[in-house]
Image (cartoon, grey):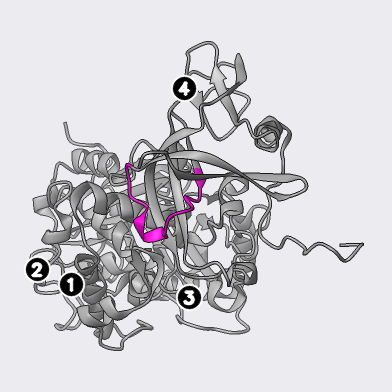
Amino acid sequence: MTWPLRGQYAIVGIGETALGKLPGRSTLSLHLEAIKAALDDCGLTIKDIDGLLTNQPIQDAMRSYAVVVATASGLAPDYATDLANGGATPVAMAQHAAMAIAAGLCNTVVCVHARNQATRSQLPERAEVRDGNEDFDEPYGFLGAVANHALMASRHMALYGTTSAQLGAIAVAARRHAMVTPNATSKKPLTIEDHQASRFIVEPLRLFDCSLVSDGGGAFIVTTAERARDLPLPPVYILGMGQHHPHSNLAQAREVATLGGAISSKTAYRLAGLGPNDMDFAQIYDCFTSNTLITLEDYGFCPKGEGGAWVQGGRIELGGELPVNTHGGLLSQAHVEGMLHVTEAVKQLRGLEPAERQVLGAEVGIVSGHGGVGALHASLILGRHAS
Amino acid sequence: MEDGGVEPYLKPVPKVEPEAAPYWQSLRDHAMKVQHCDSCGHWYFPPSTHCPACLSADVTWRPVSGRAVVWSSATMHRAYLPAYEGEIPYNLSLVELDEGPRVWTNVVEIPPDQVRIGLNVRVRYDDVTPGLTLARFIPAAGQ
């Protein structure tokens, strides 16, 4: 049976702020810039909005951030909340927006996330976002997000023979895509040799396996398919969605060479009535190259353990079999915790990008979000057509 | 230090929550304990008042053998804190105790690049401050 919500809701507007180092910009200011850009994109005003979803900005934690942003936007929403799925939050926002509209709570929801990690960040003497296990890993020198992710990469390498040079292909693809993406912040050409020559941060992960630290934000607007059809730009329909959250820490993870995406994507494929072969592109959360690799396998694009070989030879680049992170991703565009993976998927499905960065004939794509240490996962299948 | 005789310890120290106090005390005693569920038999870590396998509160602290196997491992090359500047590169590991639970640790006494997944290790207690003992691991005898 077809999922009753399939194609009933659409993303109609997207906004991206300036990206990079933005000294003096507050997180609230970046949220407002993103919202304004998304409204302007689709010709709506704040008066057309009745729902708002935010993610707590990690530098400025406050109570009920969604309402802070709503008030600052001149909005008294009928539905608003902060979601806390880490880097999976923007993908989860699209899901919650559709659910809230389906439940009758509201009609048009702004989903927004911004951060000023680059200029406000303090190196993690203590992690800024606690996951409850710091007392047990920090005393052993597990500092920074790279440490636990490196343990995930190590395990994939040990179980399947994946190599650092194979991971390099993911960094190179991201950089090539960033080079043709106007607002990407890292555009210097990057080769496998550059990747292999870059220093280890936490071995086996090198500098170019790690994502950027950025200021910036993005927003998207979800409404009903009916309303979407009255707006000027092509709607991008929500065709499937899924979540799975396998653990909160690596001590209690069943496995880390396979993550929540294995189950989350199955749910999304089932609801959409589609499979990996139907996807024209994939926007995969790439906090580290190893995470992209694990997720591509988990999403069924290749068998588990074969991702290292599979990503070679331009397969995941524009023009290849499955373009991945066509905006350059967290690795080379900017790190706004996956918000720009969603907006990029919308751009590709509108089909209005310049030829050098448009996935030709893109009809359906999948977006992943990943939070914590492989702890949280959300998937979203978007399409150009409602049915 | 007041008497000027001891270098301050500048690395992260745990906040000892009441639920985890028996764990840290067991390291102080050089006799590691972790929790065991007396309802379903599950051993687990990190500490919790309720068993993560069956949600029973019928849990007790029990000594473990101190034997473990490396479950995953990496080498830290960046000194996130000045206190680590003289220590990089150093090993980061998750080891699986013979009883089942995994703990974060450092495998020491061998070069970091020789720590392999599957390596058999045993606990070494390091008294790093008068109040804090860490459980590091070393290759088991005969390796």
Q: Do labels 1 and 2 share a chain?
A: yes
Mark 2 lies on a secondary structure that is loop
In this view, the mark in front (2 or 3): 3
Q: Distance between the residues labelled 1 and 2?
A: 7 Å
**Dot 3 corresponds to which residue?**
A214
Q: Tags 4 and 2 in contact by the CB under 8 Å rule?
A: no
In this view, the mark in front (3 or 4): 4
Q: How far apart are marks 3 and 1 (CA)?
A: 27 Å
The residue at the point 49 percent across, 64 percent down is A113
| In the foreground, A123 or A22 | A123
Q: Which residue lies furthest to the front in this view?
A: B142
In this view, the mark in front (4 or 2): 4
**Dot 4 corresponds to which residue?**
B53
The residue at the point 67 percent across, 44 percent down is B133
Can residue A170 be seen?
yes
| In the foreground, A271 or A46 | A271
Assess whether residue B73 is covered by the magenta stretch: no
Q: Which chain carries label 1?
A: A
Badge 1: residue crowd in 10 Å (few <14, some 14–19, many ≥20) = some
Mark on residue A351? 1
On screen, A300 above or below A344? above
Q: Do labels 2 and 3 share a chain?
A: yes
The C terminus of chain B sits in image quarter = top left
Q: Tags 3 and 4 in contact by the CB under 8 Å rule?
A: no
Q: Mark 3 lies on which chain?
A: A
Label 1 sits on what residue type?
Gly
The span shown in magenta is B104-118
Q: How far apart are marks 4 and 1 (CA)?
A: 48 Å
Label 3 sits on what residue type?
Ser
**Dot 2 corresponds to which residue?**
A361
Mark 2 or mark 1, which is nearer the start of the sequence?
1
